[in-house]
Amino acid sequence: QSALTQPASVSGSPGQSITISCIGTSSDVGGYNSVSWYQQHPGKAPKLLIHDVSNRPSGVSNRFSGSKSGNTASLTISGLQADDEADYYCNSYVTGNIYVFGTGTKVTVL
Amino acid sequence: EVQLVQSGAEVKKPGESLKISCKSSGDSFSNYWFGWVRQMPGKGLEWMGIVYAGDSTPVYSPSFQGQVTISVDKSITSAYVQWSSLKASDTAMYYCARAKHGDSWFDPWGQGTLVTVSS
């Protein structure tokens, strides 16, 4: 299966909101409510931000929110902060315990 | 607190074999799936495959089927990925991550194991 499509980069000023899209197909993103999002700072392991499209684990800031429409999932970061500068990846269940990641998005805080 | 602790960095030559590990601490090992993720230098995350600790059944991404072997050892609550013959293109950071049976997300993640394959 092909990687989910994300924009290579998104930028915003402190305090602004940005949205990262994750485009899949009816066989992955559109077929299941099993989209998760991960944040990865340089040299660090990925960290879970959102699961099951829009659920935040305890300890994750409510500035991060997720949604889905059809074959496209989205991650919105509101009140952008310097520490939000990182790479972000979506992930979707595909079938038979197979998963696929998105291509990744580099977020820059201007 | 649940933790996944991975084995240390490896430097290998092409053609050599390798097995790296991911030690899980915390609650019931058998109730979880353990996934492996590759990140080549400067690139994104790639899903390699997953193994259910309950019955040791692995599932591979089509891109990695036949290229690696994923396994678990319940007696020492560890998951593994192994290569029988490394290639230079296997040079990457490898992460393990855990999912509860029935969940579709992975948390926590290991700290990563850097594998360098060079002649």
Image (cartoon, grey):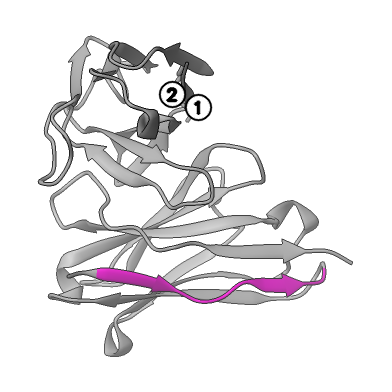
Q: Position of residue B33 (x, y in %)?
A: 26, 61
Q: Is residue B97 left or right of residue A49?
A: right
Q: Are marks 2 and 1 on the same chain?
A: yes
Please tell me whether residue B50 is drawn above or below residue B80 in the rendered image. above
Residue under circle 2? A4
Residue under circle 1? A103
Q: Is residue B61 left or right of residue A80?
A: right
- The local crowd at label 2, few if under 14, some if 14 to 19, many if 20 or more residues have their Cα within 10 Å, is many
Residue situated in front as seen by the camera: A101 or A1: A101
Residue situated in front as seen by the camera: A108 or B42: A108
Question: What residue span does the magenta drawing correspond to?
Answer: B3-13
Q: Position of residue A83 (x, y in %)?
A: 37, 35
Element under label 2? loop
Chain bearing mark 1: A
Q: Is residue B111 left or right of residue B25?
A: right
For the stretch drawn in magenta, what is the main secondary structure? strand
Could you tell me which quadrant the C terminus of chain B lies in? Answer: bottom right
Chain bearing mark 2: A
**Contact, CB < 8 Å: mark 2 with mark 1?**
yes
Residue B62 is at least partly visible in this image: yes
Q: Separation of disc 2 and disc 1 at Cα?
A: 6 Å
Q: Position of residue B69 (x, y in %)?
A: 52, 66
Give the amino acid at mark 1: Thr
Q: Residue at 29% of width from left, 75% of height from top? A: B24
Please tell me whether residue B89 is drawn above or below residue B2 in the rendered image. above
Could you tell me which quadrant the N terminus of chain B lies in? Answer: bottom left
Q: Residue at 13% of width from left, 75% of height from top? A: B27
Q: Is residue B68 magenta?
A: no
